[in-house]
Image: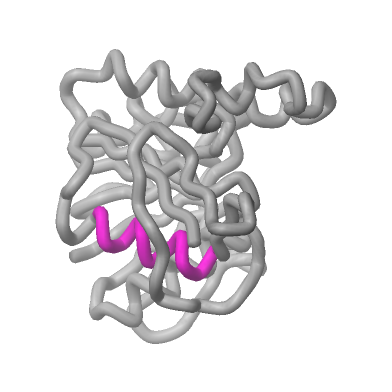
């Protein structure tokens, strides 16, 4: 497939690009500056501001699917509008863990131990998921990674879930950007979560 990666210059975006190329897909790497974007065989760089729906539409035109690794300062409505203008119907979003159930019947965001200073940084992910759940035309999927989404090795194995956070035996919820990329490209290829959310952790 030809896959457009939004935010391809970021840590998650670079791992997504590498995983897509590794599996034989071609990538349209989209970001605001060419200097930060990945390059090489199978990668086409396109400079665009994803906060502008028309610019976004032009950048993703011709793609079979779009994977967003953007921060949530670009609202869902903008991404949805850009994809519809471009005629692209498949969207996979790198989300956040804050909207997951913490295993105790409460959202991670609402738990007393969740730091207040983080809430303004992550609430956009919750709003993004809420907006997607109202979207009836696009075939979307929303990836909520583990609570600790970090740089690390490509292990190649992890556990999957849907709405409840996945913990390891030590009580940690963790996955690397590289393994998160595997989970997202698996979703692209297999389509196990149409118009739904899923999670992955070690």
Residue depicted at x 63% and y 57%: 170
Q: Is residue 33 visible?
A: no
Residue depicted at x 34% and y 71%: 20
**Residue at the extreme top:** 134
Image coordinates of residue 54 in percent, x first then y, are: 40, 32
Image coordinates of residue 17 in percent, x first then y, are: 43, 69
Locate residue 134 relative to residue 192 in the image: left or right: right
Quarter where residue 169 is shown: bottom right
Q: How many marks?
A: 0
Locate residue 117 relative to residue 51 in the image: left or right: right
Question: Magenta residues, as a range?
Answer: 177-187
Q: Is residue 99 visible?
A: yes
The secondary structure that most of the magenta stretch takes on is helix
Image coordinates of residue 16 in percent, x first then y, are: 44, 65
Residue 144 colored in magenta in the image: no
Locate residue 158 relative to residue 149 in the image: left or right: left
Q: Considering only vertical position in the picture, is 32 above or below 37?
A: above
**Residue in front for this viewpoint, 45 or 171:** 171
Quarter where residue 19 is shown: bottom left
Q: Considering only vertical position in the picture, is 64 above or below 141?
A: below
Image coordinates of residue 141 in percent, x first then y, are: 29, 39
**Residue in front for this viewpoint, 52 or 112:** 112
Residue depicted at x 41% and y 17%: 130
């Amino acid at each position: 497939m030809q896959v457009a990666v939004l935010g391809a210059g970021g840590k998650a975006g670079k791992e997504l690009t590498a995983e897509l190329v590794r599996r034989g897909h071609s990538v349209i790497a989209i970001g605001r500056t060419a200097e930060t974007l990945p390059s090489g065989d199978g990668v086409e760089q396109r400079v665009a501001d994803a906060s502008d729906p028309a610019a976004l539409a032009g950048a993703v035109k011709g793609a079979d699917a779009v994977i967003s690794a953007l921060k949530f300062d670009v609202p869902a409505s903008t991404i949805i509008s850009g994809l519809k203008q471009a005629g692209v119907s498949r969207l996979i979003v790198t989300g956040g863990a804050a909207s997951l159930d913490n295993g105790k019947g409460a959202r991670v965001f609402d738990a007393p131990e969740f730091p207040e200073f983080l809430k303004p940084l992550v609430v956009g992910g919750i709003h993004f998921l809420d907006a997607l759940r109202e979207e009836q035309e696009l075939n979307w999927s929303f990836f909520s990674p583990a609570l600790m989404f970090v740089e690390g090795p490509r292990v190649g194995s992890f556990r999957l879930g849907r709405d409840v956070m996945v913990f390891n035996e030590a009580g940690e919820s963790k996955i690397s950007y590289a393994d998160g990329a595997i989970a997202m490209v698996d979703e692209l290829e297999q389509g196990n979560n149409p118009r739904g959310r899923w999670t992955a952790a070690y």
